[in-house]
Each structure stands twice: as C-alpha cells, then as structure tokens.
Amino acid sequence: MTDTPDPARACARLLHGSRFLTSATSTRDCPPDRGIEVAFAGRSNAGKSSALNALTQQGSLARTSKTPGRTQLINFFQVDEQRRLVDLPGYGYAKVSASTRERWQEGLEDYLEHRECLSGLVLVMDIRHPLTDFDTMMLEWCMTRELPAHCLLTKADKLSRGATANAVLAVRRQAARWPGTTVQAFSATEKTGIDDAWRLLASWLQLTP
C-alpha cells in the first residue's frame, strides 16, 4: 500500500525554491494576470515578512525590519512557472507622508479588486492585537469578492499555550461573520503552526487533488 503524500511536505519543498520576481506600484506593473497567486497582507509590523521567510524556509526572501511600513510596494515571488506569492504593502501606522500612504492604498486596492489570478488572502495579525479596523476591512473585502481568507495569528511564542488557544478561539468566533475565513496560531521563530499553513497553501496553490 502506497502512503499518501503529505501536502505540507510537498508545499514546503516547492516554496523553498521561491525567488524574488518583481515589484509593482499598481496592476499596470504586475506580472501577467494568469496562473495562481496567494497574497499576504497585514498591519505594519504584524510579522508578515517573517512569516513569508519561515514558510519559504529562506532567511531573507522578504525583507524584515523593526520599522513599521518597510514593505512599500507589491512584491512578487515566483514559486514556479504557474504560481506566485505576493507580499502586499503593510498598512496601518507607517511613518510616511500622507501622499505616500495614499499611493500605497491605491495600489493595494487596485490589486485586490482587479487581480483575477488571486486564489486566497493570508491576513497576518499579531496574536496579541487581532482584528483591527484594517483587518476587518480586508475580511469584508474578501467576503464581497468571495475570496477565501486565512487569519495567521503570528508571534504566538509571545503567549502561553493556554492564552494562545483562547486567542485563536476568540478570533474564530468573530471570524464567523466572514464565510470562508479560517484561523490559526503561528510563530515564525518557533515554527508553530507551519505545517497547517503549508497544507492551506498547498490547497490554494492547487498542489493537492
């Protein structure tokens, strides 16, 4: 009897080969709108770049910084010929001018509204500060477009096991307002929840039957 391949392992191997492709300020600059893309969004300093680096098992694929708002462009990472990961601009309290913030927002909205190859949105939140106004706005958008969303509650290593479980349960209850939304705890430092995240990405990237 042949063992069923683990989609998490298959996804991990595939993502490990990811490489930077290009950056864009709007859909005009994006790669051709075909294949499959999974986008990562989150409030500034929520741990989005660290999560991407952990999931691809690369230390510096996505640039990390202690300064909020470091990701200023839509960054595309090639997984293979048909699949890409997308690092969206961090939103929230970035220390930039109002005009720059407005430009980021326009580029983000343009991408989210018009990108046809987008198969799912990973919404990265600090587990200690989940479901901000920005997060709920993104979930509302996903529901309107009937796009699946996955809440990745990062920095779970900052809480005890019991507090982590309680936080996940609380977010799941609130996320019931947005059909198609799933929730999990995650730690880029300790790799908590990484197999669950890989399995989800395997499904969205169509690596499983």
Image (cartoon, rainbow, N blue to C red):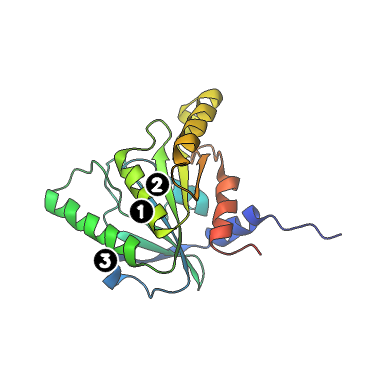
Residue type, label 1: Trp
Can residue 57 be seen?
no
**Which residue is painted at 65% across and 56% down in the image?**
7
The numbered mark, 2 or 3, whose residue comes first in the sequence reads: 3
Mark 2 surroundings within 10 Å by alpha-carbon count, few (fewer than 14), some (14 through 19), many (20 or more): many
Can residue 136 be seen?
yes
Q: Is residue 26 above or below residue 143?
A: below
Asked whether disc 2 touches disc 1, contact meaning CB atoms under 8 Å apart, the reply is: no
Asked whether disc 3 touches disc 1, contact meaning CB atoms under 8 Å apart, the reply is: no
Name the side, left or right, on which 185 lies relative to 92: right
Q: According to the image, label 2 marks what residue?
A: 48
The numbered mark, 2 or 1, whose residue comes first in the sequence reads: 2
Element under disc 3: loop
Which label is found at residue 26? 3
What percent of the width, then of the height, locates residue 181? 48, 47
Q: Nearer the viewer, mark 2 or mark 1?
A: 1
Name the side, left or right, on which 7 lies relative to 171: right
From the image, which quarter does the C terminus lie in? bottom right
Q: CA distance from mark 2 to mark 1?
A: 19 Å
**Which residue is painted at 36% across and 49% down in the image?**
140
Tally the numbered discs. Answer: 3
What percent of the width, then of the height, locates residue 46? 37, 40
Q: According to the image, label 1 marks what residue?
A: 141
Residue type, label 3: Ser
